[in-house]
Amino acid sequence: VFCCGLTLWLNTTIVPWSVERSEALLDHLKFRHESKSTQRDRIGVVYSVAFDNRADRRLWFFNRYSRYNERAYGAMVSEHDEENREHTRIIAAEAWYDPIARGWVFKDGRELTFSPVSSELIGSIPFAQRRATNYGEDPQRMLLTDRRPEDLSLHELRELINYLDSEESPKVVPYADRYFGLIADTLAPLIVIA
């Protein structure tokens, strides 16, 4: 029982911490290597990021997201009504999350408005910079949905499972399988003793 408790403690505290720290270290080394030969906005890039926030009825898409400078390039956010009809779309050359204001900043873009009934474009307003403090989506969570379950720590798996469960997404299965597999590993000492 003591060994099982020790294994549980290791799997829920030390192992997730070490996975996240080693991943951050590998990213840092990779970013440093890329910075010698690549433009700043191309370092640590993830291409074609899509995120569906059904709770707030927003659909996000980035052409690319730089994990190095934490900026999205070619950003688009569509807002939908209760019947899932698009009424507003923001398109911007750049976007980034402002953790202090807990919102997003969009740069060099345009806000499009649509008629929910006919889906016809009824307005188009250009902007140099626009703040959306009501957009609280965390870019780190957006990036989790495209990673393999084996590459995520226990904390990241739990966060992603909670999100995918709330969305009733079928993508939750491999993440839940990995999460509960790690929890079940705490019984390994009993099997060895037996």
Image (tube, rainbow, N blue to C red):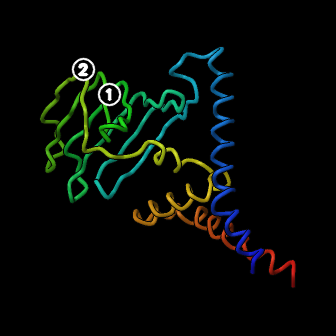
Quarter-of-image position of residue 3:
bottom right
Please identify the quarter of the rendering in which residue 156 is found: bottom right
Badge 2 local density, few (<14 within 10 Å), some, or many (20+)?
few
| The label number, if any, that marks residue 20 in the structure image | none
Q: Left or right of 64: which side holds 133?
A: left
- Residue at 62% x, 18% y is 35
Please identify the quadrant where the C terminus is shown: bottom right
Tags 1 and 2 in contact by the CB under 8 Å rule? no
Q: Tag 2's secondary structure?
A: strand
State the image coordinates of residue 80 (x, y, percent, origin top left).
Answer: 24, 50
Image point (72%, 72%), residue name: 186
Farthest-out residue, bottom: 194
Residue type at tag 2: Ala
Q: Is residue 100 left or right of residue 169?
A: left
Query: What label does residue 92 carry, if any?
Result: 1
Mark 1 lies on a secondary structure that is strand
Q: Which residue is mark 2?
A: 128
For label 1, count other residues whose C-alpha is less than 10 Å away and answer few (under 14), some (14-19) or many (20+): many
Residue 50 screen position, x and y as percent? 44, 44
**Which residue is found at the position 25% from the left and 40% from the top?**
133
Looking at the figure, which quarter contains the N terminus?
Answer: bottom right
Please give the name of the residue rendered at 63% of the width and 67% of the height, measured from the top-left corner. 177
Which amino acid type is marked by label 1? Ala
- Which quarter of the picture shows residue 4? bottom right
Q: What is the count of numbered marks?
A: 2
Relative to 64, 28 lies left or right: right
Task: Please tell me which residue lies in front, 62 or 179.
Answer: 179
Horizontal and vertical percent position of residue 62: 43, 35
C-alpha distance separating marks 1 and 2:
9 Å
Front residue of this view, candidates 167 and 17? 17
Residues 74 and 183: in front is 183
**Of the image marks 1 and 2, the number of the one nearer the N terminus:** 1
